[in-house]
Image (cartoon, grey):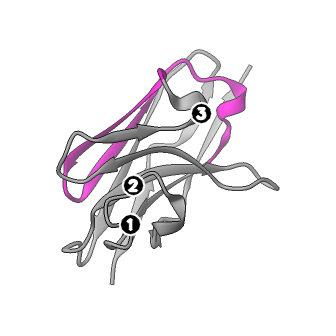
Amino acid sequence: QVKVAESGGGAVQAGGSLRLSCVVNGDISNTKCMGWFRQVSGKKREEVATIRVGTDRTYYFGSAKGRFTISQDDERTIHLEMRRLTPEDTAMYFCAEDAGDSWGHCYEMAYYKNWGQGTQVTVSS
């Protein structure tokens, strides 16, 4: 059984930075992609940044481009460095892994199978 756990969320003022971390435990032998996603209450979950495990292939979406950086320590741990935060970045941030279902198509949220509980990021103006 795979378990995903996020940490690092919190409250910050606009213009500030936060670093999120994600650790995956369990059988990751099939994992090809890991990523960060976010959701505002009442809205659809959206992609933020994803990474092909074991490579430097990364994908950024929307307003994350140029401000956020996804990185990996190893095959179980990834981070999301967020800079120049705005109130529009306020959301619950989720980490997920694909259990191999993506076949390397890390930009497709639908392939992500195992999700964490999320960590809240709140940016005040």
**Residue found at x 55% / y 58%:** 118
Mark 1 lies on residue: 102
Residue 65 is covered by the magenta coloring: no
Mark 2–mark 1 Cα distance, whole angstroms, equals 6 Å
**Residue found at x 71% / y 30%:** 88
Residue 122, image x and y in percent?
Answer: 66, 36
**Residue found at x 74% / y 19%:** 125
Residue type (three-letter) at the residue carrying disc 1: Ser
Residue 71 is covered by the magenta coloring: yes
Above-or-below relation of 96 to 63: below
The one of 110 and 71 positioned closer to us in this rendering: 110
Residue type (three-letter) at the residue carrying disc 3: Gly
Residue type (three-letter) at the residue carrying disc 2: Cys
Dot 2: element: loop
Dot 1: element: loop
Q: Relative to 111, is 39 on the left or the right? A: right
**Mark 3 or mark 2, which has the lower sequence index?**
3
- Do tag 2 and tag 1 residues touch (Cβ < 8 Å)? yes
Above-or-below relation of 30 to 39: below
Mark 2 lies on residue: 106
Mark 3 lies on residue: 62
Q: How many marks?
A: 3
Q: Relative to 66, is 99 on the left or the right? A: left
Residue 77, image x and y in percent?
Answer: 26, 53
Mark 3–mark 2 Cα distance, whole angstroms, equals 15 Å
Q: Residue furthest right?
A: 42
**Residue found at x 17% / y 51%:** 54
**Mark 1 or mark 3, which has the lower sequence index?**
3
Assign the N terminus to one quadrant of the image.
bottom left
> Which residues fall within the magenta stretch?
66-92
